[in-house]
Image (cartoon, helix red, strand yellow):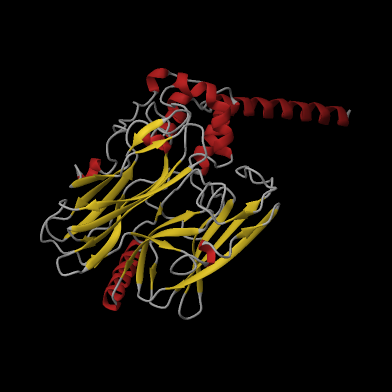
Amino acid sequence: MKNLITGKNLLSGLVLLALSNTVVLANERAITYSEDIAAILFDKCSSCHNPDGIGPMSLLSYEEVRPWAPLISYKVERREMPPWHLDQTVGIQAYKNDVSLNAEQITKVIAWAQNGAPQGDPALTPPQPNLPDAGQWQLSSTLGAPDFVVKSPPYTVTANAQDQWWVRNTSFEGVIDEPRYVRATELKGSYPLGVKVLHHGHAQLRSFDDNGNRASGPVGRQGVGKGGDQFPEGTGMLIYPSGSINWNLHYFPINEIVPNEQAEAAVWLYPRGYKPEFETRGEQFFAADSGPGGLWANDLVLPPDSVKSLQGVRVLEKPALITSFRPHMHMRGRAQSLQAIYPDGSRKMLARVDKYDHSWQINYEFAEDAAPLLPQGTMLMITSTWDNTADNPNNPDPRQWVVFGQRGVDEMSHLWLGITYLSEDQFDRLTAERNARLTAASGE
């Protein structure tokens, strides 16, 4: 009898527990497109996934999103979308342009898709974002119209072919009439088809004044997933009135011919007579040495079905502020990291991409007080890893020997750093000012 009563009590307890859980579940609002998912997509995805964007489908309405809900969930769960390939376990994690989803957003998207991707009340859907005209300069929304625009010579991109690497020089004359300082640059393909075929590219200016003084630097660097480059306030790049522009453009064909494509580079200048405190050469190329060799070319041989890593070191001859980090490899690239080895022998991982994807050329822009301030004598160690096996989903053929080359099916390794070299006094002052801000923010 005692056991029977205990059994009844146990059964009653289970029933009450089930009812209690049912009440909790009933009180939890279902995750819907209108109230939860639309805001995430508008904020993180719409800049590419719109009728004029580079995304393969538009995601601006429930009707457009619903058929793709399972794929969206799959890509989000694997952190493939939005594209942000940084290793989130090491290195600096504070960036100005972070488009990644946080854990709560990822959980919501997955749960919504698993629950059948309900729409919810359409009246609760936030307004669609006010997207900029795809043919306009991205930086014009904050800086206004550029001071000048230069164009590359025309090039016809064929349909359904291998990627095409195209290099030409053009004259830079009559654009400015005196030395000026650049505050921002942007490079893009022409609208509407040029923006779809220009995978990445560089417009490098070599300029001179009447006295033979030389200044060189980019008037535009572009990559899929990379916007324009605006220097920090008080930082500029000097250019002279006479010279030439080297156009180094990497096209990836689509399903139609793009005739007479001309890439365009826009430049925003500081006012006449303004001399910034800090001078930069813009985003700079870094490999294992100062030119071809090391990680850039000579040491790069990937056997079939192999995984290989190489390292190279550059020493900073002056103190420096690094504002951005952009890795570059090709289809076999898996990971690349940037580590600082300080003059006292201590080490710090600055940034590491562990899911590299050549389809994207993302420029990771450090937050202001997280951007590395490095003393003279710091060694920058670049470590690159390639995966030439069938486990690499981007690998076109793991049976091939792979060497250095310009095509996507060949390989290379370097990175681009937004870097400004400093005097010792500037380095000491910027370090002291940053420490004061961080101390004030912590309340100490």
Work out whether 127 lies above or below 431. Answer: above
Q: In the rendering, at what x and y percent does residue 294 appear?
A: 53, 67
Identify which residue is drawn at 44% across, 32% down: 41
Q: Residue at x 35, y 74 (%)?
A: 319
Q: Quadrant of the N terminus?
A: top right
* Residue, far right: 1
From where the camera sits, is residue 140 visible?
yes
**Residue 35 image-quadrant placement:** top left
Is 47 situated above or below 90?
A: above
Quadrant, the C terminus: bottom left
Residue 321 percent across, percent down from the top left: 35, 66
Q: Residue at x 19, y 46 (%)?
A: 148
Q: Nearer the viewer, residue 368 or 300?
A: 300
Residue 366, horizontal then vertical, whole percent: 39, 57
Q: Nearer the viewer, residue 369 or 5?
A: 369
Q: Residue at x 50, y 43 (%)?
A: 359
* Number of callouts: 0
365 vs 154, nearest the viewer = 154
Determine the image quadrant of residue 43. top left
Residue 444 visible in the displayed image = no
Location of residue 128 by image quarter: top left
Q: Nearer the viewer, residue 358 or 117?
A: 358
Q: Left or right of 118: which side holds 42? A: left
Q: Position of residue 284 (x, y in %)?
A: 37, 61
- Residue ranking furthest to the bottom: 344
